[in-house]
Image (cartoon, rainbow, N blue to C red):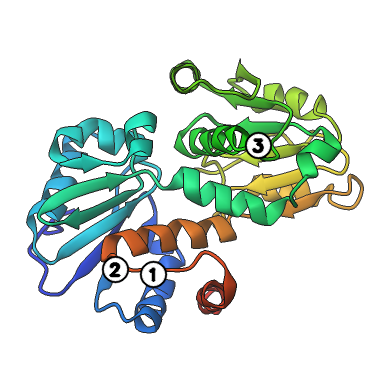
Amino acid sequence: MPNAYHPRTEPTMYFIGVTTGSSSIMKVFPKWAEYLGIDAKIEGFDFPQHDDPEKYREVVAFIKNDPMSQGALVTTHKIDLLTASRDMFETLDPYAETLGEISSISKRDGKLCGHAKDPITSGLALERIVPDGYWRRTGAEMLLLGAGGSSLALSMYLKEKKEKGGDVPSRIIVNNRSRPRLDEMRSIHQRIGMNIPVEYNLCPSPDKNDAFVAALRPGSMVVNGTGLGKDGPGSPLTSDVVFPENGQVWEFNYRGDLLFLDQAKAQEKARNLHIVDGWDYFIYGWTRVVAEVFDIDIPVSGPGFDEISRIAAGTRS
């Protein structure tokens, strides 16, 4: 990124990801800024997955030291970025400390702040998918494909919801194609006292995932938290997968080839599936970080949120 870190001349928020130029936020943010009275622009910084730690330190140092740089939303690199630059943050919220990741970079009183917003945003999005009482009524399970930050955050939300007596899946199954992330999730769950039964499975190939999908109870939810379909092509499942009858299918992504979504839609009528992409997750994720970066209140429901959603939907192709 030659000349990427030159001092900005107007307030700027950044999107740190893999293919940021393809994101709807590049069209949505200017419209949101106008509606919310924010005087700022947005720019993207793209990095390959699991990039050199020094590259993450460079972008964090730039945001920290450039007066016009207001903050950033971080996706895909949430764990790697914080691992590389933890010493550069003066404050981290409790979720960031626990999860070892950040999705939000902001500034307060000269201090660089990191927040992990996914336990909040994934929870808000989940509650729009399943009605209250759904899990108790059906006894359904949740299969998380991928043990990365978003899946871990969703499991934390469910843990906290159960603590409050809320309705949660009867069991969580986590599949991942490599061992380290799986072990890290298990370790964090043990540390926080996970109160929902969790099964951890090493599944290096899509056909292994297919078997776990087929074994789910009717009504269960299958979540694609792998990034496949957006950050990389493909799906964590094969075309031979059989989704649970009356099941819930949640694709965390809203853009890309979305093969996982296509696989579900092919069985939508035959299996009576409720299929949701990542659009609401996208809205919640961005509005929570924009609110943090610019220190403003953005509603999560009601007419104000509906208008924000309508503005965003107007840019969606």
Q: Which residue is pictured at 7% across the width and 64% down the height?
A: 7
Q: Position of residue 249 (x, y in %)?
A: 72, 45
Question: Residue 26 — which label?
Answer: 1
Residue 317 appears in the figure:
no
Q: Amino acid at mark 3?
A: Gly
Mark 1 vs mark 2, CA separation in Å: 7 Å
Q: Amino acid at mark 1?
A: Met
Q: Which label sits in the foreground, 2 or 3? A: 3
Q: Amino acid at mark 2?
A: Ile
- Front-most of residues 106 and 223: 106
Q: Which residue is pictured at 58% across the width and 32% down the height?
A: 163
Q: Position of residue 74 (x, y in %)?
A: 34, 49
Q: How many marks?
A: 3
Left or right: residue 258 versus residue 111 is: right
First-in-chain label (1 vs 2): 1
The vertical placement of 45 against 306, above or below, is: above
Q: Position of residue 292 (x, y in %)?
A: 32, 59
Mark 3 vs mark 1, CA separation in Å: 39 Å
Mark 1–mark 2 CB contact (< 8 Å): yes
**Quadrant position of residue 174:** top right
The vertical placement of 110 against 178, above or below, is: below
| Residue position for label 3 | 165
Left or right: residue 70 versus residue 159 is: left
**Quadrant position of residue 81:** top left
- Front-most of residues 218 and 180: 218
Dot 3: within a 10 Å radius of its alpha carbon, few (fewer than 14), some, or many (20 or more) residues? few
Look at the numbered disc 1 and give the secondary structure of its residue: helix
| Residue position for label 2 | 42
Q: Which residue is pictured at 47% across the width and 33% down the height?
A: 148
Look at the numbered disc 3 and give the secondary structure of its residue: loop
